[in-house]
Amino acid sequence: MIEPIQIAGEAAWLKHYDNGSGRRYRLAALDLLARKLGLGPLRPPPHHAGRDARDVEQRRILELQDAGVRVPQILGVGDGALVLSDIGPTLASRMREVAGEPARLDALTEEAIAAIGDGHARGAHFGQPWPRNLTVDERGVGFIDFEEDPLEVMPLDDAQARDWVLFAYGTARYYGGRQDVLSGMIGDALAQAPTEVAEAAGRVGARLAPLGRFARQLRHRDTRTVARAISVLRAAAPLLLAIAVLLGIDLIHDGEIDFFADLLF
């Protein structure tokens, strides 16, 4: 849980970390499925709770700061809680504001893509770069929400491939009818990515590509978004069919894969 607070007249956030909710067996099943299907970048990281989750986020914020990535400042540490500085409105809120203005929407997307690519070039990974976990203001793009670390279950190449997959899925919903534009922007970024990252994404996409046709036949809003995201990533880079990964795979805040969960439970 996170709540806004004021410190010396400045906006800040108090983030509490829950004590867990018995997700161990469910995550284990999802992890087994991802491994059996060869979907390394989609393995769910362990869901930490309480002090452990706080410690993971504190460590990751400090690591990203050392890498030169814009993240919140840690203003205080409590028992199962952190006090974090405010680094601006979320990218998701800004994209909703300009949804009817393609030029402004594209500018926001390009700025976010550049920030992810720059972070990767510095050796960083983000874990959950949904538009809701990016911020953007006059100071630039920032990143939030690091209570899980994909490197606990995958190498850096897979973790960076995962970042592109989740970002593409998160932004595809704002590009109905304009997938070619988003494809071009992501394609330009992927052309600069290390070969190992592209290959990691490609291995996942190759296995999930058949889901694209299935998603297009469904009418649920989320599956339409998934199909759109796959279309975007296919156009962006044939190797990165991983965007096929986006085919209904939504790694929400707790790291679970909704699409797989629906199939299993």
Image (spheres, rainbow, N blue to C red):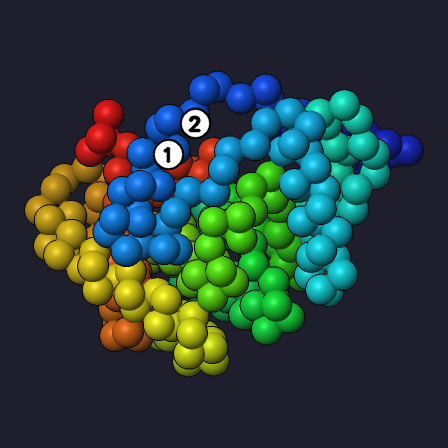
> How many residues crowd mark 1 within 10 Å: few (<14), some (14–19), many (20+)?
some
Label 1 is placed on what type of residue?
Ala
Q: Nearer the viewer, residue 35 or 217?
A: 35
Residue appearing at x 25%, y 48% in the figure: 36
At x 53% / y 48%, what residue is drawn?
Answer: 152
Place residue 195 in its image quadrant: bottom left
**Could you tell me which residue is drawn at 35 percent across and 41 percent down?**
31
Q: Looking at the image, is 96 positioned above or below residue 193? A: above
Q: Is residue 182 left or right of residue 49?
A: left
The crowd level at tag 2 (other Cα within 10 Å; few <14, some 14-19, many 20+) is few
**Camera-side residue of 138 and 212:** 212
Residue in front for this viewpoint, 154 or 211: 154
Q: Quadrant of the N terminus?
A: top right
**Residue 18 shows which numbered tag?**
none
Answer yes or no: is residue 145 visible: no
Residue position marked by numbered label 1 in the rendering? 28
